[in-house]
Image: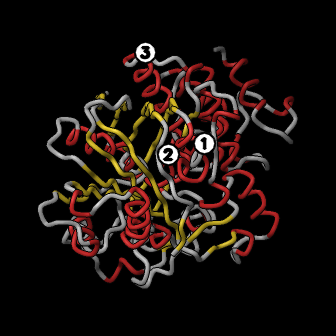
């Protein structure tokens, strides 16, 4: 999965935040819609799409979507 | 992963008992009605049956009431019971084992083997495997597998991630040695103690003895407060582990025992929370009609959820016809199990009891 595809898949897990708001540099934990359920959806999306396991700590430790992408890629 | 296959035993009956006292999640004072509704939508938990934890109702009492009724309905004489296994994290005492207390309180002969297994959500599948293997050689003829928890006791009232989730229940499964039985039980297990920090009651064991700091309410963020004598759960870590590894245990079990998903009647998912269960249902590719729920009425009752599903959702079918069931669970530890349970009807299940 490319970074662009990752950002798109990431954005698709949000119901209220418009997709065009998402870029690799988006600080996802600062988004109004960010919360525990969205976090679980991201964990699930990464598992479905990339068969990689993102932990809760990973989501708390990364800042931008790109950070998370590189972390997942390194697993 | 480790797998076992159990033959020569038959499940003859099952029963469940929950506290009569009901707690409605909508009545929780710590959240707004909108927040509570959002929580109910995500977890699926509308209400729970919870004991008052003053010693008047313990897990063993729920299991005992269920067992007394089941034995009477089955017409089993207590003198015939030679194995009693109690699986729980909420025992009567730190010692002795609650299974042995139950032997005495129920009037089961002292000649029986009774012991406890300390496990949570995976308790039914581990108990079934241990007991099945003990019985399949004929060394034991009639056994009672008691699985339950009253762990709403461990939830901090100021921790909505636990207190609105946990319910109490006790179950019993009556198992008989029968070399002609067509029942089949196949189970694959996985254990990973690196997950212990994610579901833990930190103090009160030998590692962290109770001390004055154990009782301090600590601010854990997100409006959650608990002491070190309350159960702590990091929900996203459990979710991350479960959604990733349950499908892997399932695939291994499926390959090892040649299971055709189309031939499965029901997939019984440990009722952890509906959000996790639905993700798992979709990942394992089962349609909604094959995956029953009762989490709305009982919450997460730990090891009791799978037998409780069989009691409340499959009570008549388990008597009327053979069923090819799958069961999957992730629990405290982490301890995971996925099982195939092929039954052949005539499993006696009295109506759910209350105490």
Q: Which residue is drawn at 65% across and 35% down?
A: A42
Q: Which residue is drawn at 40% across and 65% down?
A: B63
Residue position for label 2 = B238
Mark 1 touches mark 3? (CB < 8 Å)? no
Real-space CA distance between mark 1 and mark 3, rounded to the nearest whole angstrom: 26 Å
Q: Residue at x 81, y 69 (%)?
A: B33
Real-space CA distance between mark 2 and mark 1, rounded to the nearest whole angstrom: 9 Å
Among numbered discs 3 and 2, the one appearing first in the sequence: 2
SS for callout 1: helix
Residue B219 showing in the rendered view: no
Mark 2 or 1, which is nearer the eye?
Answer: 1
Q: Where is residue B157 in the image (x, y as percent from the top left)?
A: 57, 75
Judging from the image, mark 2 belongs to the subunit labelled B
Mark 2 touches mark 1? (CB < 8 Å)? yes
Q: Where is residue B14 in the image (x, y as percent from the top left)?
A: 45, 52
SS for callout 2: helix
Q: Which quadrant is home to the N terminus of chain B?
A: top left
SS for callout 3: loop
Residue position for label 1 = B276
Residue position for label 3 = B258
Among numbered discs 1 and 3, the one appearing first in the sequence: 3
Judging from the image, mark 3 belongs to the subunit labelled B
- Numbered label attached to residue B248: none
Label 1, residues with CA under 10 Å away: few <14, some 14-19, many ≥20: many
Label 2, residues with CA under 10 Å away: few <14, some 14-19, many ≥20: many
Vertical placement of residue A11 versus B153, above or below: above
Judging from the image, mark 1 belongs to the subunit labelled B
Among numbered discs 2 and 1, the one appearing first in the sequence: 2
């Amino acid at each position: 999965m490319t970074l662009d595809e990752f950002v798109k898949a990431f954005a698709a897990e949000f119901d209220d935040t418009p997709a065009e708001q998402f870029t690799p540099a988006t600080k996802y934990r600062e988004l109004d819609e960010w919360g525990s359920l969205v976090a679980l959806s991201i964990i699930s999306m990464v598992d479905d799409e990339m068969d990689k396991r993102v932990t809760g700590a990973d989501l708390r430790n990364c800042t931008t979507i790109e950070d998370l992408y590189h972390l997942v890629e390194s697993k | 992963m480790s797998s076992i296959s159990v033959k020569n035993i038959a499940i003859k009956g099952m029963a469940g008992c929950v506290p009569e006292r009901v707690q409605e999640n909508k009545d929780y004072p710590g959240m707004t009605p909108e927040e509570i509704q959002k929580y109910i939508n995500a977890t699926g938990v509308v209400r729970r049956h919870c004991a008052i934890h003053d010693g008047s109702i313990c897990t063993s009492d729920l299991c005992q009431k269920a067992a007394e009724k089941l034995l009477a309905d089955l017409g089993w004489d207590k003198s015939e019971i030679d194995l009693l296994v109690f699986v729980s994290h909420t025992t009567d005492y730190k010692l002795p084992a609650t299974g042995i207390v139950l032997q005495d309180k129920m009037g089961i002969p002292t000649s029986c083997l009774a012991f406890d297994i300390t496990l949570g959500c995976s308790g039914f599948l581990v108990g079934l495997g241990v007991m099945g293997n003990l019985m399949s050689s004929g060394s034991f003829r009639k056994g009672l597998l008691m699985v339950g928890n009253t762990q709403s006791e461990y939830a901090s009232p100021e921790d909505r991630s636990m207190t609105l989730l946990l319910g109490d229940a006790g179950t019993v499964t009556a198992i008989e040695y029968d070399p002609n039985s067509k029942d089949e039980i196949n189970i694959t297990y996985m254990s990973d103690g690196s997950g212990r920090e994610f579901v833990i009651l930190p103090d009160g064991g030998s590692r962290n003895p109770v001390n004055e700091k154990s009782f301090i309410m600590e601010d854990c963020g997100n409006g959650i407060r608990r002491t070190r004598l309350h159960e702590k759960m990091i929900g996203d870590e459990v979710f991350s582990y479960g959604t990733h590894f349950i499908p892997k245990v399932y695939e291994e079990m499926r390959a090892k025992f040649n299971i055709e998903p189309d031939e499965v009647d029901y997939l019984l998912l440990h009722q952890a929370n509906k959000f996790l269960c639905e993700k798992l249902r979709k990942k394992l590719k089962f349609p909604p009609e094959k995956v029953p729920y009762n989490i709305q009425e009982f919450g997460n009752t730990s090891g009791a959820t799978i037998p409780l599903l069989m009691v409340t959702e499959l009570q008549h079918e388990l008597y009327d016809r053979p069923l090819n069931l799958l069961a999957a669970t992730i629990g405290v530890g982490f301890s995971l199990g996925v099982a195939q349970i092929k039954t052949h009807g005539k499993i006696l299940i009295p109506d759910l009891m209350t105490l």
